[in-house]
Image: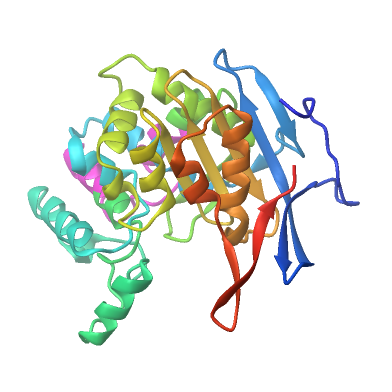
Amino acid sequence: MSQPVNATPGASNSGAPVLAEVVRSGFVEGRHRGSVVLLAADGTVEWALGDVTSPVFPRSANKPMQAAGVLRAGLDLGGERLALAAASHSGEPFHRDLVRAMLDEHGLTPQHLRCPPSLPLDPEEQEAWLAAGGRRDRVAMNCSGKHTAMLAAAALRDWPLESYLDPDHPLQRVIRTVVEEAAGEPVAAVGVDGCGAPLMAISLTGLARAFRSFVLAVPGTPGRRVADAMRAHPEYVAGTHRHDTWLMRGIPGVLSKVGAEAVQALALPDGRSLALKLEDGSARALGPVLARALRLMGVTAPVVDRVGRTPVLGGGQEVGEVRAVF
């Protein structure tokens, strides 16, 4: 590794180091600050930049733990259905079709969903949706698979459906226990995610530990079942044109999940893992920063270059790039 643990080159007065630069026509026009932690196979912190011990909201990077929570609550999901329960899906037809099928299988309807109506996340699918006269819809919302699984678990246990997003709901208490066990630390705060679900704050180090725990879990346990389903069906976790899909297809055994506000967590099958967050929440630098972190871990698969390439355009032509600088 090229830097010692907790080194912070380029740190601002806030203490956050510069992780990436935006270069246009040879001129640095912007910088992205943040924090990143890499864990060794034994779970110790091997390398870190910035603050990796204070709590953050992992956003959708928490979804594997939420999916493990519905399994622990007794819901029996597998394959594409379990992958979709951990998804920030793109709203492509196969995503929407499976959400509707899962609702029907558990005696539910789209009206039970408490996630907000939304357009498909994938830009191409969004254009097609609007061109066909589509409007914002709860099934198209990227978290609808998670919400469907939560509702199904509540229905199975005869828990209230209308309050399934309440932090004190029995299901959400189960999920909190899973988060704390996987992260190896207590939840520091509970907020409301963009989809309306409880959002549990942990540190970046705890987030990396959680992903490590899932890939190393005993087969058949909730965490391992979620990891296996996500890795076997990554298109259902993300979509056709998304980094998580490419990574889980391109690096054997990897578990990867992005979160809003520029959060990313990933674990390799041997237990090495990482978590990162960009302070400004901009997703444009996420790929280059993630690719650099993977290279520091010794990962050289071609997909790393694919994920790390973020060109800057001018007049429709490439005139620069977003590049990692650590």
Q: Is residue 309 left or right of residue 188?
A: left
Residue drawn at x 9%, y 52% as measured from the top left: 107
Choose between 254 and 309: the one closer to the eye.
309
- The boundaries of the magenta stretch are 149-176
Is residue 165 on the magenta stretch?
yes
Kindly indicate the quadrant of the structure image that contains residue 7: top right
Choose between 301 and 245: the one closer to the eye.
301
Residue 158 is at least partly visible in this image: no
Residue 273 is at least partly visible in this image: yes
Q: In which quarter of the image is the N terminus?
A: top right
Above or below, 164 relative to 79: below
Above or below, 128 relative to 69: below
Residue with the most extreme right position: 13
Above or below, 273 relative to 112: above
Kindly indicate the quadrant of the structure image that contains residue 56: top right
- Residue 287 position, x and y percent, is 55, 51
- Residue 302 position, x and y percent, is 45, 41
- Residue 124 position, x and y percent, is 33, 73
Q: Is residue 152 left or right of residue 215?
A: left
Residue drawn at x 62%, y 61% as measured from the top left: 282
Residue drawn at x 21%, y 66% as measured from the top left: 111
Choose between 122 and 296: the one closer to the eye.
296
- Residue 61 position, x and y percent, is 48, 44
Residue drawn at x 46%, y 18% as measured from the top left: 270
Q: In this view, does 197 lie to the left or right of 227?
A: right
